[in-house]
Image (cartoon, grey):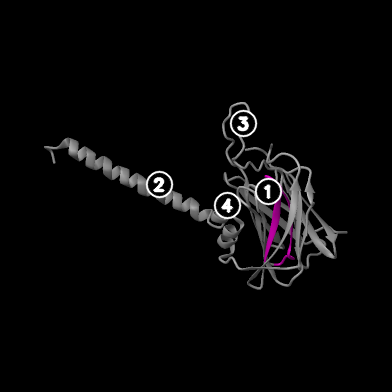
Amino acid sequence: MADRKMKMRTRLQDGVVELQILITHPMETGLRTDKNTNAKIPPHFIQKVNVELNGKVVVVVNTGTAVSEDPLLGFRLKGAKNGDKLKVFWSDNLGESGTLEGTVDIS
Amino acid sequence: MTQHPRRTFLKNSLAIAVLIAVGGTGLLHQTRALAAEWPKDAFTAKKVEDAVQALFGSGAMSPSTSIKLKAPTQAENSAQVQIQVSAEMPNVEAIAVFVEKNPSPLVAHASFSGAEGYFSARMKMAQTSDVVAVVKSGGKLYTARQNIKVTAGGCGG
């Protein structure tokens, strides 16, 4: 299994805490063909991303193949403050998954 | 039975085949149950209306100016089109983003419980198309759209 890097960042945007998540992932659609072998490249894409704030799920995203490679997703969290715990979980159509924990840092 | 070993053999193999078939579907059901939350029908739908129907169980939407779409009018790289949807209405339950002319229009579907009605992502576009945002608020569906011109290439093209 390839190593899927994840990053998260929080910042204050329009008075609300905005969370951005970057996941390194090929997001293959299954529609592309390998130019050398002419074989179809099988689909491989993230299907689900969950965001937990202080242990409570606040966002659930279903994603399809039209989300770009290395997805960068943005959300705005209600009532989040400095030091609040964040946890992001993703899983894809081949059963791979990843988790990243962090804290809200808008100082 | 002893007179017809071949028949018995056939019967047995048939029974085994049935067992395998049942076991197989059983396994399939299990994996499907685990993945049940991912709305496959909505993601494989070929039309925006069908995808909305599959996702929300209703196709009745009204246009709303409270939904702000922030996207380029012209995309330089069709594989990385930045889009921001922000719904300025109370109690936004979900935001779904569609590219009308993609082979499968549904891009992403975000559900909220404790987050603002805001979603941003980068998406792929096969060709020049309208981008449609559908917002669920208070049990009703609202929509907004914007055209994005794609100048070169399709997905990975």
Give a yes or no on whether discs 3 and 1 share a subunit. yes
Q: Which residue position is annotated with label 2? A: B24
Circles 4 and 3 in contact, beta carbons < 8 Å? no
Residue situated in front as seen by the camera: A55 or A2: A2
Circles 1 and 4 in contact, beta carbons < 8 Å? no
- Classify mark 4: residues with Cα within 10 Å, few (<14), some (14-19) or many (20+): some
Give, as a single range, the part of the protein colored magenta. Answer: B114-135
Q: Which residue position is annotated with label 3? A: A34
Disc 4, SS: loop
Give a yes or no on whether discs 1 and 2 share a subunit. no
Q: Residue at x 82, y 62 (%)?
A: A82
Query: Gap between marks 4 and 2, in whole Å?
Result: 29 Å
Mark 1 belongs to which amino acid?
Answer: Val
Query: The residue marked by circle 4 belongs to what chain?
Result: B
Which numbered tag is attached to residue B150?
none
Give a yes or no on whether discs 4 and 2 share a subunit. yes
- Report x, y in % for residue B80: 74, 45
| Quadrant position of the C terminus of chain B in the picture | top right
Query: Gap between marks 3 and 1, in whole Å?
Result: 20 Å
Q: Which residue position is annotated with label 4? A: B46
Q: Earlier in the sequence, mark 4 or mark 2?
A: 2
* Mark 1 or 4: the one toward you: 4
Residue A100 visible? The answer is: yes
Q: Residue at x 66, y 73 (%)?
A: B138
Which numbered tag is attached to residue A67?
1
Query: The residue marked by circle 1 belongs to what chain?
Result: A
Query: Gap between marks 1 and 4, in whole Å?
Result: 16 Å
Disc 2, SS: helix
* Mark 1 or 2: the one toward you: 1
| Residue B145 located left or right of residue B32 | right
